[in-house]
Amino acid sequence: MTNDGGGAPEPEPAGRLTEPATRSVEPTPSPDEPDPPRHPGSSKDPNHHASGTPQGTSKLPNDRLAAARGRFAALLGEFRRAAVLVPIDPHGSLWTSDHGGVRWICAFSDERALARFAYAQGDADREWTYQTILGARLLDVMVPALGIPTGVALDAGSADGILFPPIAGIVPDSAAVDLRDGSGTPE
């Protein structure tokens, strides 16, 4: 693999960026599901906690959501500070993939992750040229420059992969699809 980063230093290990993101969401009953049978006055009442707080008023799901958001924010911050490898396509542009109406810039935390991607593409026998780019530059400069809904796929195709979609708080507001009006232009 060839680093076409113009003499840019080799990236340091990306830390948690190469570890699998842990996501766990407890299933919550839908409003259409019937309530479970109750046993009033007993400890087997499914709506009674030992704390005395009725189950329906627990803040536990909101706490989990807040914790998950905090973990993602930390991961996003780490990505923004990390130097990642972005392969160059045969036309000299950043390697991208279109999926679900979004163009994804493919970035990799290290050469091993890029090599696994090349192998999965059936293209491991050729030399892959890449640039070393800071995650913040990808999100803040490259994403808006493309002028279409664009996000970043880190370690695409791996169990450790993560997506940074083009939404507010991840990319600049001008490139955030959740802040666009129905015509596709920023509000």
Image (tube, rainbow, N blue to C red):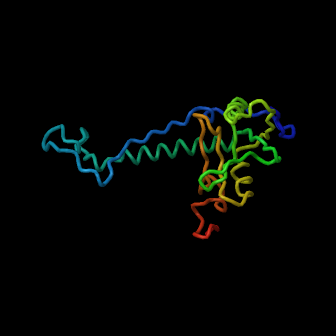
Seen as rendered, the residue at the extreme left is 41
Residue farthest toward the right in the current orientation of the protein? 6
x and y percentages locating residue 182 in the rendered image:
57, 69
Q: Residue at x 62, y 67 (%)?
A: 184
Q: Nearer the viewer, residue 5 or 102?
A: 102
In the image: residue 10, left or right of residue 27 = right
Q: Is residue 43 left or right of residue 185?
A: left
Query: Image quadrant of residue 78?
Result: top right
Residue appearing at x 68%, y 35% in the figure: 117
Rendered location of residue 118, percent (x, y): 71, 34
Relative to residue 33, is residue 24 depicted above or below? above
Residue sitting at the far front? 122
Q: Picture coordinates of residue 49 (x, y %)? A: 25, 41
Q: At 61% from the left edge and 70% from the top edge, which residue is drawn?
A: 183
The residue lying toward the viewer, choosing from 137 and 51, is: 137
Left or right side of 20 for 116:
right
Quarter-of-image position of residue 156: top right
Residue 83 in picture, x, y percent from top left: 73, 39
Name above or below for residue 123 compared with residue 144. above
Placement of the C terminus among the 4 image quadrants: bottom right
- Give the quarter of the figure containing the N terminus: top right
Residue at the image position 76 percent from the left and 47 percent from the top: 94
Q: How many marks?
A: 0
